[in-house]
Image (cartoon, rainbow, N blue to C red):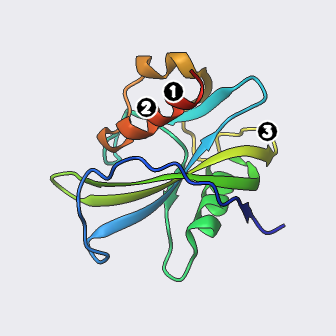
């Protein structure tokens, strides 16, 4: 089933100006369940920003749309099938070692049971508890946007 994208976009200010060539494009899903808990998973120690919690997603492949990357990554990592997604924001962030462009989507409609397909730890977290977890630096505006929506 193709992914439906809704048109509503809530913008979060960009962190840095990056050229199209420099940034790694990443699809990020803010997966929210019926209890309004957000799905997070822990990055492996060997990864960039390792041992931190993250919102699920991953790098866009060449010639792949960002929506297709979101769908692929959530299925490959966690066994979830995205039914629809709504753009939340785009974050451009410059780490000392790399630049990332995070294209972030709300995911309220999905099917499947969360399964750790890559061995990562995961959990459903209440929105008000997100601040208790350490996320990659580029994720701070995303966490702020999530908390603002559910206040």
Q: Are marks 2 and 3 in contact (CB under 8 Å)?
A: no
Q: Are marks 1 and 2 in contact (CB under 8 Å)?
A: yes
Q: CA distance from mark 1 to mark 2?
A: 5 Å
Question: Circle 2 — which element?
Answer: helix
Of the pair 60 and 102, the residue shown nearer to us: 102
Q: Which residue is mark 1?
A: 147
Categorize mark 1 by other alpha carbons within 10 Å: few (<14), some (14-19), many (20+): some
Residue sitting at the far bottom: 63
Q: Is residue 45 left or right of residue 108?
A: left
Q: Quadrant of the N terminus?
A: bottom right
Q: Earlier in the sequence, mark 2 or mark 3?
A: 3
Mark 1 vs mark 3: in front: 1
Residue 50 image position (x, y, % from top left)? 34, 39
Q: CA distance from mark 2 to mark 3?
A: 27 Å
- Residue drawn at point x = 48 percent, y = 52 percent: 89
Q: CA distance from mark 1 to mark 3?
A: 24 Å
Residue 130 image position (x, y, % from top left)? 48, 23
Q: Which residue is mark 3?
A: 113
Q: Which residue is mark 2?
A: 144
Question: Circle 1 — which element?
Answer: helix
The answer to whether residue 98 is above or below residue 52 is below
């Amino acid at each position: 089933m193709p992914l439906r994208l809704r048109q509503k976009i809530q913008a979060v200010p960009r962190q840095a100006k990056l050229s199209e060539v420099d940034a790694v494009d990443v699809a990020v899903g803010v997966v929210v369940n019926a209890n309004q808990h957000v799905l997070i998973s822990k990055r492996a120690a060997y990864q960039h920003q390792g041992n931190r919690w993250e919102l699920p997603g991953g790098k866009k492949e060449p010639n792949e749309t960002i929506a297709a990357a979101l769908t692929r990554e959530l299925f490959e990592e966690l066994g979830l099938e995205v039914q629809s997604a709504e753009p939340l924001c785009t974050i451009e962030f410059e780490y000392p070692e790399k630049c990332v462009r995070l294209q972030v989507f709300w995911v309220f409609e999905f099917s499947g049971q969360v399964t750790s397909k890559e061995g990562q730890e995961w959990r459903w977290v209440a929105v008000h508890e997100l601040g208790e977890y350490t996320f990659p630096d580029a994720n701070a505006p995303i966490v702020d946007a999530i908390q603002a929506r559910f206040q």
